[in-house]
Amino acid sequence: KQEVTQIPAALSVPEGENLVLNCSFTDSAIYNLQWFRQDPGKGLTSLLLIQSSQREQTSGRLNASLDKSSGRSTLYIAASQPGDSATYLCAVIHAGGTSYGKLTFGQGTILTVHP
Amino acid sequence: DVKVTQSSRYLVKRTGEKVFLECVQDMDHENMFWYRQDPGLGLRLIYFSYDVKMKEKGDIPEGYSVSREKKERFSLILESASTNQTSMYLCASRPTGGRGYTFGSGTRLTVV
């Protein structure tokens, strides 16, 4: 059974810092990996999607990497801002079997960026 | 941009009521999903659908049913609402063939 773990569970940083959020998964047979952001009481906003054949994706100040063989992904946020404060969720999309196309989520990293 | 629209942001219902949560997507996605999210338990899959009139049970289908009469609409039905169904409900859609998920803004349901 696929398990997804995110470290750290919570992170508090001053504005302007570069930071790294970590995600690990136990089964490397994944289709894609997707990073989401969730603000309190709101839905999930997709940040980056990495196909299994890709190594990284970038969008603005965000960069996500994927090492499928070691079961790891990182989300790098450059020059953090208070508006980046949210919960960040990593999710893997299953590649095959009865779980094909389904998502398994990590428990999330709660990020607080203070001015 | 793909939009997934959930009809209600907040709902308060009484125990025993039949409750309908509606979800509509505007990008012709084949696959649609219903999740619930609870503190400490994360997101859990209730039901999903790969095509019109098709439905598959997820990890926690008990107490729920779904309807997909049109490709763009996926409804979650609580046949007889109970207090343990108080939760945040999230709808999502995904095209077949490699693209990611798009989620709606969520419905916070309280059953009293």
Image (cartoon, coloured by chain):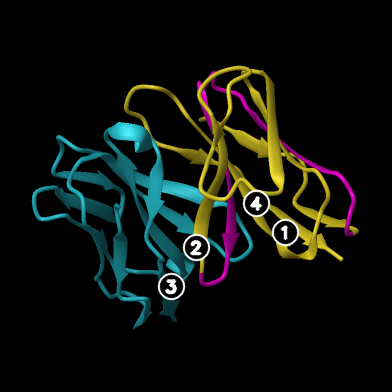
**Position in image of residue A80 (x %, y %):** 34, 69
Residue at horizontal 72 percent and vertical 59 percent from the top: B85
Q: Is residue B98 above or below residue A93?
A: above
Kind of residue at disc 2: Gly
- Camera-nearest label, 1 or 2: 1
In-front residue for pair B42/A56: B42
**Position in image of residue B98 (x %, y %):** 32, 27
Q: Is residue B71 above or below residue B43?
A: above
Distance, label 1 to label 4, CA atoms, is 10 Å
Distance, label 2 to label 4, CA atoms, is 12 Å
- Camera-nearest label, 3 or 2: 2
Side (left or right) of B17 relative to A59: right
* Bounds of the magenta segment: B15-40
Kind of residue at disc 3: Ile
- Camera-nearest label, 3 or 1: 1
Mark 3 and mark 4, same subunit? Answer: no
Question: Is residue B33 at least partly visible in the picture?
Answer: no
Mark 2 and mark 4, same subunit? Answer: yes
Query: What chain is colored cyan?
Result: A
Side (left or right) of A16 relative to A46: left
Instruction: Mark 3 and mark 1 in contact? Answer it, CB < 8 Å.
Output: no
Q: Disc 3 marks which residue? A: A110
Q: In which quadrant of the rendered view does residue B18 lie?
A: top right
Mark 1 and mark 2, same subunit? Answer: yes
Q: Which mark is residue B42?
A: 2
Does the magenta-highlighted stretch encompass residue B16?
Answer: yes
Distance, label 3 to label 4, CA atoms, is 20 Å
Query: What chain is colored yellow?
Result: B
Classify mark 3: helix, strand or loop.
strand
- Camera-nearest label, 1 or 4: 1
Does the magenta-highlighted stretch encompass residue A95?
Answer: no
